[in-house]
Image: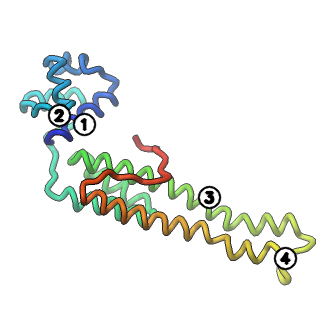
């Protein structure tokens, strides 16, 4: 793994383990200034230091393979179009240790997918439950044959949230694929950070 990705990953893993820079330096038998310089991206550490960091942080920093990184990033972002959580989850799980970018952006895709899946379930529930509730509430006026003043508009508008979510997922997937391939920041709107 090369800088600055190495420094970002060391910082992230250190914080996940709840270690300070001084504690990490002590366990790796290096100076705290060395850890600071690695995390800030100022230096490329020696192989021995990378090995020690890997053992302490329980992460293989030598496994980075960025030869097909753009292909995997594009696949991750394109998979968000379909709102099928298993596809980006498998891609991210398989490639997260090989690239910091894939790990970071994969988490963003997963958070977006989880959020959209929850929205789809809520919209599907409203699609099914809405007419039932209106029919039950206004049973005297609405019959299966004649309908009522609210029944027809509800039946026409009920699938609208599902369609809007589909268009939104399509737009976010394409836009973030283009951003990723041109090394611009990734942003998924309405995404709740479930996976950190």
Label 2 to label 4: alpha-carbon separation: 67 Å
Q: Position of residue 192 (x, y in %)?
A: 49, 47
The quadrant of the image that shows the C terminus is top left
Residue 7, placed above or below residue 176: above
The quadrant of the image that shows the N terminus is top left
Q: Are marks 2 and 1 in contact (CB under 8 Å)?
A: yes
Residue 60, placed above or below residue 131: above
Q: Secondary structure at mark 4?
A: loop
Label 3 to label 1: alpha-carbon separation: 37 Å
Nearer the viewer's eye, disc 2 or disc 4? 2
Q: Secondary structure at mark 2?
A: loop
Nearer the viewer's eye, disc 4 or disc 3? 4
Badge 4 is on which residue? Answer: 148
Check disc 2: other Cα within 10 Å, few if <14, some if 14-19, many if 20+.
Answer: some
Residue 46, placed above or below residue 155: above
Label 4 to label 1: alpha-carbon separation: 60 Å
| Label whose residue precedes the other's in the sequence (3 or 1) | 1
Q: Position of residue 180 (x, y in %)?
A: 28, 57
| Residue 71, image quadrant | bottom left
Q: Position of residue 135 (x, y in %)?
A: 82, 69
Q: Position of residue 63 (x, y in %)?
A: 15, 44
Check disc 3: other Cα within 10 Å, few if <14, some if 14-19, many if 20+.
Answer: few
Badge 3 is on which residue? Answer: 122
């Amino acid at each position: 793994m090369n800088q600055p990705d190495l420094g970002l990953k060391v910082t992230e893993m250190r914080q996940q383990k709840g270690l300070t820079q001084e504690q990490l330096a002590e366990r790796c038998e290096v100076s705290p200034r060395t850890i600071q310089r690695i995390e800030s991206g100022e230096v490329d550490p020696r192989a021995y230091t990378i090995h020690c960091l890997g053992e302490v942080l329980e992460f293989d920093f030598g496994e980075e393979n960025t030869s097909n990184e753009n292909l995997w990033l594009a696949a991750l972002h394109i998979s968000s179009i379909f709102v099928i959580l298993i596809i980006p989850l498998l891609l991210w799980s398989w490639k997260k240790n090989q690239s910091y970018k894939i790990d970071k952006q994969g988490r963003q895709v997963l958070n977006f997918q989880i959020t959209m899946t929850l929205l789809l379930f809520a919209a599907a529930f409203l699609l099914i439950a809405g007419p039932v509730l209106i029919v039950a509430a206004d049973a005297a006026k609405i019959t299966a044959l004649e309908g009522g003043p609210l029944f027809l508009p509800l039946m026409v508008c009920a699938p609208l949230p599902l369609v809007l979510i589909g268009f939104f997922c399509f737009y976010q997937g394409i836009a973030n694929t283009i951003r990723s391939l041109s090394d611009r920041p990734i942003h998924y709107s309405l995404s709740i950070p479930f996976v950190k």
